[in-house]
Amino acid sequence: MQTRAYLIYFCRFVGLLSVGTFLMGCNGTPKTKESKSEGPQRPNFIIIFTDDQGYGDVGVYGAAGFKTPHIDALAREGAMFTDFYMPASVCTPSRAGLLTGAYPKRVGLHEAVLFPFSKTGLNPNEVVLPELLSPLGYTTGCIGKWHLGHFPEFMPTNQGFDFFHGVPYSNDMDGYLYKEPPFQSPPLPIYKGETMVAQGTDQDSLTIRWTNAAKQFITKNKDAPFFLYLAHNMPHLPWHVSGKFKNSSERGIYGDVIQEIDWSVGQIMAVLEENDLDDNTVLIFTSDNGPVTHLENGGSAGPLRGAKATTWEGGMRVPCIVRWPKRIKPGTTISEIATAMDFYPTIASLAGIEDMGGHTIDGHDMSALLFGSEGARSGYDAFYYYGRNGDLEAIREGDWKLHRTKYDFRTRTYDDSLRLFNLKRDMAESTNVAESYPEIVKRLSLKMTEFDKKITSEARAVGKLAGE
């Protein structure tokens, strides 16, 4: 691990001095458009990543019972996606897809989530977003929830991040007793870097804690480009909110939690303005998967069917807003298919990286979509929906979506019914038209089989502990 850390910082040093090329891990030789000294400062990037916030849980997406004025302001001042997807319907694989630009199956993290008893994690050989940016002089920070492996070799500061302040996994794993296998999880630990600084902390303070840490990170690094990955624990169960926001909404504690998240977004917007960073900061807001909807006054997928842990639209289509006053036209609406895997090549492109090296990714540069370029279209010939158990369950090609199988992890049952929907006419997936379009069913089913076979053969190894 020391050798890897040395290489990352050596690469960063080389990137500051050289023009045109830099080393990145051991997976290729990416090229940049200009050295830091030859042009304007590269843009800052902030990804605000909430946990289990549904498509219908933001004001501009139709939320009711609570208000999100700051997130709504992002949409007015930037671009709002209507067809934005996570590459999974649960926590760990979604985060792996975002940070690697690849389907979770490609990096071995496609089955369920990691637990406090898990002995695997994101492979340190993967080249993740901060490792692309560090050689260009970026300071990189991860604040909040990690959930890609809790052993030291899998933690953020051994995956290219300069700074980490957060928790290693979900807040519901706080002191939880697992039956299979028998395992007593410890009180939820909080880390700074690789050092545990607290344990079993009152979760009512988490959103405020991560917000304040993010503001400090931005202020400290305002004079050079930075990348901040702010991954909130909320609104993942169990729901927690500070006293300031308790009973502040009409939707009970869930609405209160969302309004505190909106407050957090407002705080980030304010610190950018205070430090004159607005124009040169790409600010992204999105959620890691669909909502929990089975509880009273819980999350909402809006007009979409399904919820977290399903491959219905409501499980994987999420709100996404991107603001960059310098380049994105205010009030832009993007209806093309885009995914969290696209952040990787898009951020690389906006930072000036022309060649990301030899590793395979599945995301597409969506800069043209963001900038409203004439004729800009989605880079996806098809998007593939992998279920909670790691199986490929559905495909979207244009307006058509085919479901080939369904796994219910609560009942441990399968449903192999073929279902075909036209999402343009039926975004709620309410009318199965498979019998009317057998040729489309056949074509999409074959496409699913071929893609899954290909990605299985190309998949890279998951990270494992030495000796395991």
Image (tube, rainbow, N blue to C red):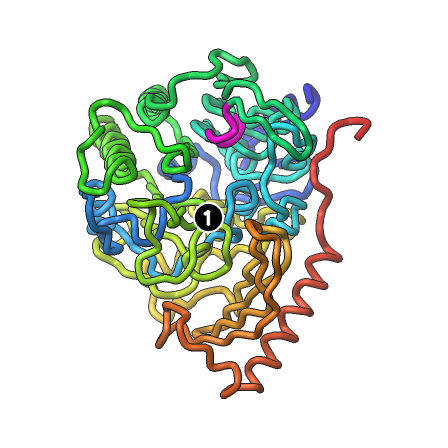
Q: Answer with left or right where residue 420 lies relative to residue 159.
A: left
Q: Depth check: 443 or 98 in front?
A: 443
Q: Answer with left or right where residue 349 lies relative to residue 360.
A: left
Hey, which residue is sitting farthest right in the picture?
467
Compared with residue 12, is residue 191 higher up or lower down, i.e. above or below?
above
Res 278 seen here: no
* Residue at the spot 29% in from the left edge and 48% down from the top edge: 57
Q: Position of residue 353 (x, y in %)?
A: 51, 45
Q: Depth check: 349 or 341 in front?
A: 341
Q: Depth check: 307 or 81 in front?
A: 307
Q: Position of residue 129 (x, y in %)?
A: 52, 39
Q: Answer with left or right where residue 298 lies relative to residue 70.
A: right
Q: Residues within 10 Å of mark 1 (few under 14, many from 20)?
A: many
Amino acid type, callout 1: Phe
Q: Position of residue 407 (x, y in %)?
A: 59, 58
* Residue at the spot 64% in from the left edge and 51% down from the top edge: 105
Quadrant in the picture for residue 427: bottom left
Q: Which residue is mark 1?
A: 343
* Residue at the spot 31% in from the left edge and 57% down from the top edge: 302
Q: Which quadrant is home to the C terminus?
A: top right
Q: Specify whether residue 169 is painted magenta.
A: yes
Q: Position of residue 254 (x, y in %)?
A: 29, 39
Q: Answer with left or right where residue 333 lies relative to residue 431.
A: left
Numbered range of the magenta stretch: 168-174
Q: Depth check: 289 or 152 in front?
A: 289
Q: Specify whether residue 382 is painted magenta.
A: no
Res 383 seen here: yes
